[in-house]
Amino acid sequence: MPAASASSSGGLLGGLLPPCGTTTYPFKAWGDSSAYCAFPNLGFESGATKWTLSGKASVVTGNEPWHVSGSGTHALQLGPGATAQSSTLPVNLLDPWVRLFAHSSAANGSLRVQVVFRGLLGNLTEVLNVGSLSPGSYSSWQPTQRVLSSLALPVLTTSAQVVLTSTASSGTWQVDDVYLDPCASKLG
């Protein structure tokens, strides 16, 4: 069943900083009541639209079993060395958290999660290696823990992208429903 949604006004500073859009509570069943914004084409239901895939990355049939973003039927698959980069999502204030669903199919290496921060003109402000998922913890579909992207956004940051990379030399990773929890949603 899809998670409930609400409109995000950007909290106390909504008029000064870009809103990330409509928020939802996709991880509430796991005790996380934070509001999240979805990265564009979060569930890969539109193929690779809004994502840049390289190496052995592709969109495949399959979905996380809880259907938190609706009745989806597709997921991202990352083979050995493959990378996927999302399009940008506006961010504001401090501490955006990244959270997603992942599944390892006999992968012998981790899934690296990075956040790329961009400024007002699209310029790169910082790249953070924010998490490394161990294949043993994801032998079946699981929601990840909240992955902290930074203690504070780099100065003049207006948007973020997620970069997912399989460090495995065999096996695959599958990813579905990629979300961002901007701190500003907690201040409203």
Image (cartoon, helix red, strand yellow):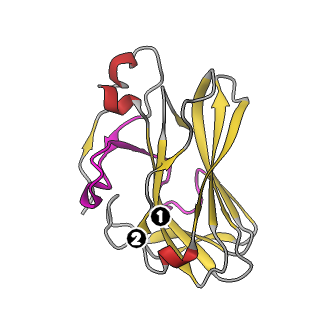
Name the residue that disc number 1 marks.
Answer: 176
Q: Secondary structure at mark 1?
A: strand
List x then y, in percent, for residue 34: 31, 44
Q: Quadrant of residue 153?
A: top right
Q: Is residue 156 above or below residue 131?
A: above
Question: What residue is shown at x 63% (from left), y 69% (from top)?
Answer: 110
Q: Is residue 100 above or below residue 108?
A: above
Extreme residue in the top direction: 16
Mark 2 residue type: Glu
Q: What range is drawn magenta here?
A: 21-50
Q: Is residue 41 magenta?
A: yes
Question: What residue is shown at x 46% (from left), y 58% (from top)?
Answer: 100
Q: Quadrant of residue 185?
A: top left
Q: Is residue 4 above or below residue 188?
A: below
Q: Marks 2 and 1: in contact by CB < 8 Å? A: yes
Name the residue that disc number 2 marks.
Answer: 64
